[in-house]
Image (cartoon, helix red, strand yellow):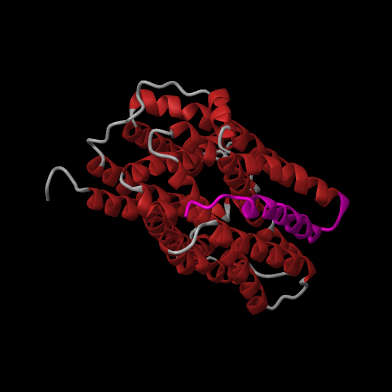
Amino acid sequence: MPTKLTRKEKIGSLLIAVFILAVSFAQIAYVQSTFLNQFFSLEIVGLTFFVAYLITFLTINYYPNLIARFNNLKTALVVLFLEIISLLTFISTSQPIIIFIFFIVYIIAINLIFINFDIFLEAQTSNTRTGKVRGLYFTIYNLGWVVSPFISGQILDRLGFNWLFLLVIILTLPIILILKFSFKNFHNHYSHRHFKIIQTVKELLKHPNLEKIFYISFLLQVFYSVMVIYTPIYLHLTIGLTWTEIGLIFTIMLLPFVIFEYPAGYLADKYWGEKELLTIGLIITAIASILIFYLNTSNILIWALILFFSRIGASLIEIMRETYFFKKVDVEDIGLINAFRSTSPLSYLFTPIIFGLALYLWPINYIFLVLTIIMLSGLYFSLTLKDTK
């Protein structure tokens, strides 16, 4: 194999790495609250998430400076090693304070690595192929999520958390090797720059359409955070479904990300702009959320269909926001890329406050009524967005 890989080969390597990354992250995503609940009350679990994502948000906003100083590859490898150290800590100790600290480290690590992957991918992608490449990228990534709920459920039922964490460590090792081999000659295009939050905000405010896509991205992350934090609890404690049934539902639920994102990205490149599919996606997520609000059945087929429907909308929003944003920026715009990814931790700060208040005032199903209203608020931004076509 040649020492220097072609652009196509680098993208191929990154697709393999992001698939493994997705499989590893998804093993833990829907069970992390249950893991923490072994050491803390539900109230402290919520506080742990809030603190973790607050520190993550602050770290993300300094991360471009570290990438500019030390190189995208070196920072990516350090972050992956921090993830492994966190998982080894979960296996080796049962001290709550240590679990608390290293859970924060774990959350920081899994958020930072996506910024590194964005930079690797953006450096290999031309604007005319952004939708197609990003569509393929997210299809591969989401395929990893689809296959994971069943695997993690089986491991937890039969072997427990330690074996699940060990699996994730094993999966992380080939990611390190792939990045080290494929991007060993990767050079930053922005090492001379120093990034500050205020400068990034000023840059963002110069571009109204980027502001709109940021807001839509934030709404999508709020949708995800509500679904990750509250939907499993709602289905298990209120509706009365078993974890085995919930795992099956979630596997079906995630299929739209594999089915729709690549063709949607291709259509956005070749025929349409992004605003039409963004608008359709927002409407679908709002309709699905209001259906969940009214639904009171333990029929797993009905739940699978409604959650599947909700992810059709989410998949359209996800790939359109990615396509639109990365057509507007380049690899040198690391500050904007960094801010774009900060919408995820921001949503985890926003969600416990707003939806915690909703829980205090109303029964848990009212969370999904509030979510409906929030998703509909994005229609103004999608309808007034200027297409890239």
Q: Residue at x 78, y 55 (%)?
A: 370
Q: Is residue 96 visible?
A: no
Judging depth in this view, the residue of 268 and 189 nearest the camera is: 268
Image check: 120 left or right of 203?
Answer: left
317 or 164, which lies in front?
317
User: Does any portion of residue 347 appear in the rendered image?
Assistant: yes
Seen at 65% across and 50% down, the residue is 381
Q: Does residue 133 lie above or below 172 as drawn? A: below
Q: In the rendering, at what x and y percent does residue 72 appear?
A: 35, 33
| Residue 98, position as x, y percentages in the image | 56, 33
How many marks are shown on the rendered structure?
0
| In magenta stretch: residue 365 | yes
Which residue does the image show at 72% across and 44% down from the upper left? Answer: 352
Q: Which residue of the protein is positioned furthest toward the right in this rendering?
A: 361
Instruction: Reply yes or no: does residue 200 show up in magenta.
Output: no
Residue 292 image position (x, y, % from top left)? 73, 67
Magenta stretch?
361-389
| Residue 201 quadrant | top right
Rendering quarter of residue 301: bottom right
Q: Toward which corner of the image does residue 76 lie, by quadrant? A: top left
